Amino acid sequence: MLGKNATNSCAICESVNESWSLQEIARLVECVIQRWYTGKSNFLKDLDDIENLLQQIEVETTEVIYESSYMAMLYKHTGNFSGMEFHANESQISIDGHHNHSKMSFWLPKELALTSSDTFVFLTLQVPNKTFDNNSAKLYEGRVFGLSVSKRRVSGLRESVNITLTLNYSAGQNKTPVCVFLDNQNLSTTGCKTELDRSQTSVTCRCDHFTYFGVLLVPSSISPKDQEILSYITTIGCSISLFCLVATAFLLFTTGDIRTEDSKKIHASLVIALILLNLHLLPSEMAAASSSPDFCLYMAPALHYFLLATLCWMGLEGFHLYLHIVKVFNIYINRYMLKISVVGWGVPALIVSACLILAKQFNVYGHTDKPHSICYITNDTVKYTTSLGVFSLVFLFNTFTFIETARFMFTARTTNLKKGSPSEVKKNSCTVMVLMTLLGLTWGFISISFGKLSTAGLYIFSTLNSLQGFFIFIFIGLSLRKSKGSKASSISTVNSTNVS
């Protein structure tokens, strides 16, 4: 049953000769697997030997092996290979046809290019407990799935191998499935992408190589119930914010000062960016759930652009504050508003344009199959570089500006001998809180949304940031009221002087 050119590269292969039948080889593999449970054999070494042995078996057509502890398929392809799909459960394998009780399905891409000289080997088995040293996570059903091709090492596939498993665990267990593969004595996720369907009843692993795969159940940092509540908080908060931002824009553009005061022009630009961000964020979850991929492909880069524009204008708020309060000097910059507008609207456009160019080769924009997902960046590298990277720079600069501004304010009050006034302290505290919102420092609460404080941090982050427009409305309204009061007082003083 073994090929004439079979080698003795594995220990168990040495005990097999060409006259052995497929059933005899299958029972030998079963005996090797049973030894794992006694702890007297090397699991990884035996698994490698089993794979080598199965690859050396010569078959004329597809052969399926069913044993109590494992199941294997030796597939021989004829003709041109255009991809292959097969389904399986614990006791049955079906090629190119779905049977009602299948628990797993596999798709092999055309790029694999199987020929008549290749033997494709599929092996699924349960591994003993404590095979992997991981107390916080465990393999789903303790099962791994091996894919291999005789005499070939399959890696770097441009079209992924898809492995879909039907899940029967309760969502209330607070576990998140993660696709992993066996990398020596470790479980790794490199080259694999996990996609959980919206109903959380199945998970798909998309990988660019062949090896032994499994699904690891990792304790979730946030429960599905909390995800749903946070989604409602974000929707309600963003709706309130949007209404307040529109009202703020109306106040700013109906006052004549916006034509002459750079501060109000910058406030107006930030408000416009936030309005457009909220307008695209609110329907984004609906777009991800819709059957129209084009709608999501528009929403994702648009949401990315307006998020970056919002971050840039928050950074420019900090820059303007730094120039006029911290530096204190009357600094003149030629075409000041034009230059910062190029930064505020132009830099995000350049970043998104670069991402759109990359999208032609890589999957950059779209949505995942997770519940409550939105249309945004799906590539983690792009997401962390363009979103988290820009946010980190803006947050660090604005934090520095905020600290310097707060120090300047309280130092000035102390110098003017007003530090003893409770109303002055209260006024300064309110100003500090408003500055935090205007500079986007409340976005920093995302940093505590990891680890033990993850759930509480996400609630704080979602509440404060979804209501950012409301706080800006209060700030702009009070500023305009104070400005009108100062003008009225000045006019009254001038009139009194003229009468005298």
Image (spheres, grey):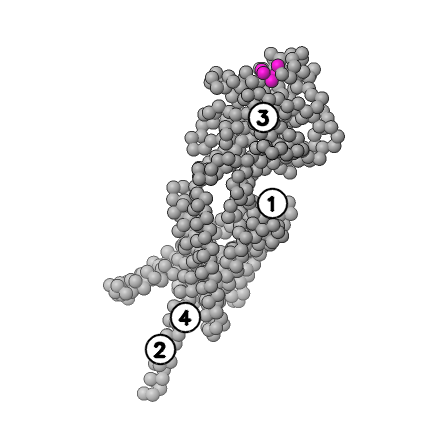
Find the residue positioned furthest to the right. Answer: 79
Compared to residue 56, the image places residue 499 above or below, namely below
Pointer 2 with pointer 1, Cβ within 8 A: no
x then y, percent, for residue 362:
62, 44
Residue position marked by numbered label 4 in the rendering = 480
The residues tagged by marks 3 and 4 sit, at their Cα atoms, a distance apart of: 74 Å
Quarter occupied by the N terminus: top right
The residues tagged by marks 3 and 1 sit, at their Cα atoms, a distance apart of: 36 Å
Find the residue positioned furthest to the bottom. Answer: 499
Q: Which mark is residue 489?
A: 2
What's under tag 1, amino acid-wise?
Answer: Asn
Pointer 1 with pointer 4, Cβ within 8 A: no
Q: Is residue 485 shown to the viewer in this render?
A: yes
The residues tagged by marks 4 and 2 sit, at their Cα atoms, a distance apart of: 14 Å
x then y, percent, for residue 219:
44, 37
Q: Residue 363 carries which label?
A: 1
